Image (cartoon, rainbow, N blue to C red):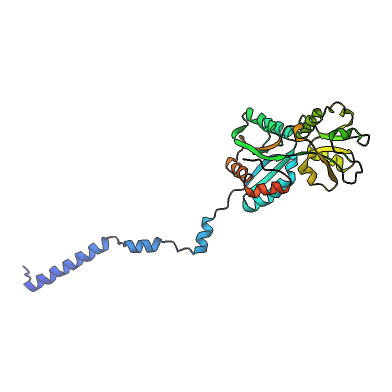
Amino acid sequence: MFKMGKSSMVILGLSLALLSGCAQQAEQPAVTTTAQTQTATQAPAQTPVQTAAASQTPAQQVELTISAAASLTDALKEIQTAYESKHKNIKLNFNFGASGALQQQIEQGAPSDLFLSAATKNMKALVDQQLIDASQQANLLVNELVVVVPADGKAAFAKIEDLTSSDVKHLAIGEPQTVPAGSYAKDALTYAKQWDAFQPKLVQGKDVRQVLTYVETGNAEAGFVYKTDALTSKKVKVAFAVDPKSYTPIAYPAGIVKATKHSQEAGDFYAYLKTKEAQDVFVKYGFTIPAK
């Protein structure tokens, strides 16, 4: 029988140990350090410009429909330019007309986010029907009633009774049922006990701007409009201011329509209309800000 010496047995043992270690190393999965994993998966660092660009998500475009009395046209168009320049995601669409007609449109479900009326009675009607929340409406402006005549007219009138003159063949007023300016004119004529007497002369307009146009074009020798409307035209002149005791005070309330789908944006614009910036524009066009 073959016998191994001590030295041979030591060599054989070392060889077997070496082979066993190699086998274990081959079977063991590779281990990746935490530092290596983070280095491999870490995204490239963004520059400050890239970070800012990623965080600036374009605001969604919102269109607001504002139903407003025709007498507010010029002031609101200027306010529109200023507001949209500061709120790039807001587009203001105005629906100008007679306050009574606008009230009826809202009652019938026409899209509207805000209502700006030339009479408190139209706003009250919508509040009573719960179409506008009483807490989200307020008197915004005050106006005055005047009588205008063509700028080149020779006749001089100082009071309502003077309009009975043969020089006045047509007297323009707004339709009293739907046009607040017409309702105020009826109040004044009734107060002067002249409403019935003027019936043959009356020419009624669908809104106060149409009344102004009648006088500008000579289709009426005189007309009842707001002071603010008279100031917008070089084709007419104010004959006289109507006695404020003869008609209901002219207040312009503004309110948010409950059916709006953009309550936040509508509320923001409603609040803006009360700011000094907006009020200065209204004053520029002849309106008065009501005392607080």
Q: Position of residue 11 (x, y in %)?
A: 13, 72
Relative horizontal placement of residue 235, taking residue 125 as reference (left or right): right
Asked whether 212 or 241 is in front, the reply is 241
Outermost residue toward the right in this view = 166
- Say which quadrant the C terminus sits in: top right
Residue in the picture at 77% in, 42% down: 227
Q: Is residue 95 visible?
A: yes
Q: Is residue 255 visible?
A: no
Relative horizontal placement of residue 28, taking residue 122 as reference (left or right): left
Count of marks placed on residues:
0
Asked whether 170 or 178 is in front, the reply is 170
Residue in the picture at 61% in, 29% down: 130
Report which quarter residue 38 is drawn in.
bottom left
Residue in the picture at 82% in, 47% down: 233
Outermost residue toward the top in this view = 196
Report which quarter residue 131 is drawn in.
top right
Outermost residue toward the bottom in this view = 7
Report which quarter residue 186 is drawn in.
top right
Asked whether 129 or 40 is in front, the reply is 129
Q: Position of residue 223 (x, y in %)?
A: 84, 37
Q: Position of residue 166 (x, y in %)?
A: 94, 34
Q: Position of residue 93 (x, y in %)?
A: 69, 44
Asked whether 148 or 134 is in front, the reply is 148
Residue in the picture at 8% in, 73% down: 7
**Is 179 situated above or below 227?**
above
- Say which quadrant the N terminus sits in: bottom left
